[in-house]
Image: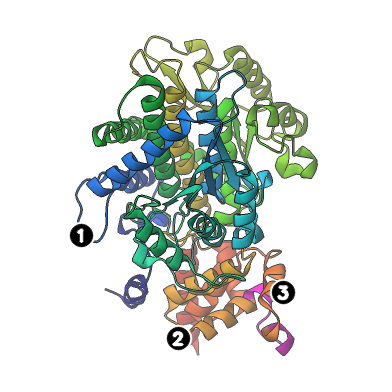
Amino acid sequence: MNMDELKQSCHELSLPVTEKCNPISRDIDRVNGKQMVQILRKCDAEIFEKKNHDPFHQRLYSSPVIQTMVDVAKRVEMMLRDPEESLIVLSGCGTSGRIAFLLVTSFNEMVKAPKQKQICSYIIAGGDRAMLTSQEAPEDDPALGARMLDKICAGKKHVLFVGISCGMSMYSMQAPFVAGQLDFCLKHLDVFTPVLLGFNPVHMARSEPMQDCSFHFKDVAERMIAEQRHKKAFVLNPVLGAEAISGSSRMKGGSATKIILESILLAGHEAAFRGKRVTPECISAWITASEMVYETTYSHSDELAALIHQAGESLQMKAHVYYIGWQTLGIIGLTDASECVPTFGADFDDIRGFINNGFREMKNKEGDLSFLGPEFVIGHKDFVDTILPSLSQNDVMLFLFTVNDDLHEVTALADQVRRRTSNLHAIAHDLEKFTIPETVCNMFGTVLHITWSFSSEEVNSVVMRQRWELSTKWCLNAISTGAHVLKGKVYMNYMIDLRVTNSKLYRRAINILQRFTGCSKGECERALLRAIYSTDDLSEDMTSADVWKHTDVANRRDQVVPTALVMIQCGCTLAEARHHLDCHPVIRDAVSACFSSSKTKSTMD
């Protein structure tokens, strides 16, 4: 073990599972597209791992986890039997809130009846604008979370609340917001049945105080565990293994959230409307169906690798990737694209999503948000009017559709795009007895075309659509992650080029630097400030400024953390660090080049 590995292994011991380095993907920044797909496939396989190598960690298939899912599904059944007095609320931030929105949309479609109010609702910190852009400030506010929950549940006698916080820690951006909501539920157990969904053991939850708060997340989680003994609250926290990109919970965390909550909601629905009793076997069957979706999706590894390569080349040339989706696959595209900005420090137009009929198709609570700015211009017509005229051959177009979508609309738009570029590809889903015509597929270059064999009772159902969504999510997560890795936005398997836009990301940036360098917090913070303020000589005003001042400046800088890392690792100046990053898009190569340059200088001296 070399010195870098020793420093990291010592640091890893203190980290929650979701923040650890996954050994499977340790060298993902040095492999090609085909190898990358196999790495991501192995990482995602850990979601369904049945062997439990650690007695302190429960897996998704573990009996206690399955039983808790059964208990929660029975609460769903109860809510569905009394829809006037009841409400199911799914809440989270970032990816968690977006998944909550998608699940609520599908579930309400399934149970809709004439004159019946919607039984299921979503909360996302920052409101609907957070579905398309990062909204950090509301995520840090426990009191705001509680107020939003109180408002949405006014007048209801029975509320099943699911708070989604993948990390359950100070590293999890949604922890304070969701903690405030869970605390509110625990104070009103006569109305609320709270459920905490996350992917770390409770003992790994952090105990640091939260903003304007008398409690911390670990305190809330322990109170939830205590109430679970009386079935008044529930904690669902199977361990999935570390993410392929450390801390990027949009990947396994997002997929597992979708799998777990869909299994619970569907089991409760079948019990209420089809008389099927909720059992552990029933829940396990829903999870196994999702595992089949995983296997089927990754069986198309050659096409997926080709799409990663094409998207990566596009970003390397400072071009763009555009997802053009229909119905909920459009929402999956919008979600994946929006996550690239905070995860990889990308510009919002590096990867963008568009959906047929724009916000009318989204059916979000706040309606059309296009007046808020270009990030909220999301309709196909908007794409044709604003993007298509300047489309270049280097831009990647990726259509997302199924056999149930309007294929005349798909071909008409594809024909328009082909007049501008041949760099046009697709992810398309159909059925064995209901296939997409070959003439449609022939319009595209690389086509990741999956033909599914569903039972007759699932055809044309919400369940079929949900599985297509999950498959498309896995594909797009792989494409956008792979493309940014190829662009050099990842160091080993860490999302190092994050934008330092708030106090938590400022602390995370310092933590990353400590992790890789073994230097003190003070040394790492000083290097970070040099990168933020673009100087080798920090003034007292700079070092004594409040964190919000640092983050305000950092938000306008590119490659802040990579620059600080190279400066620390190589003991070089700001200009030298930036030069090496410009010459070497892979950050590890920049560090190596800087070391080589330093050695050459030493020899000459």
* Residue named by callout 1: 55
> CA–CA distance between discs 1 and 2?
53 Å
Magenta-colored span: 531-542
Q: Nearer the viewer, mark 3 or mark 2?
A: 3
Return the x and y of residue 519 as percentages of the image width and height. Answer: 46, 83
Which mark is on residue 603? Answer: 2
Q: Quadrant of residue 292?
A: top left
SS label for mark 2: helix
Q: Secondary structure at mark 1?
A: loop
Residue 219 locus on image (x, y percent)? 44, 68
User: Above or below — where is 540 with respect to 259?
Assistant: below
* Viewer-side residue, 28 vs 96: 96
Left or right relative to 397: residue 11: left
Q: Which mark is residue 549?
A: 3
User: Amino acid under label 1?
Assistant: Pro
Q: Is residue 533 magenta?
A: yes
Residue 379 position in % (x across, y down): 70, 30
- Packing grade of label 2 (10 A; few <14, some 14-19, many >=20) is few
Q: Is residue 341 magenta?
A: no
**Quadrant of the rendered image containing residue 335:** top right
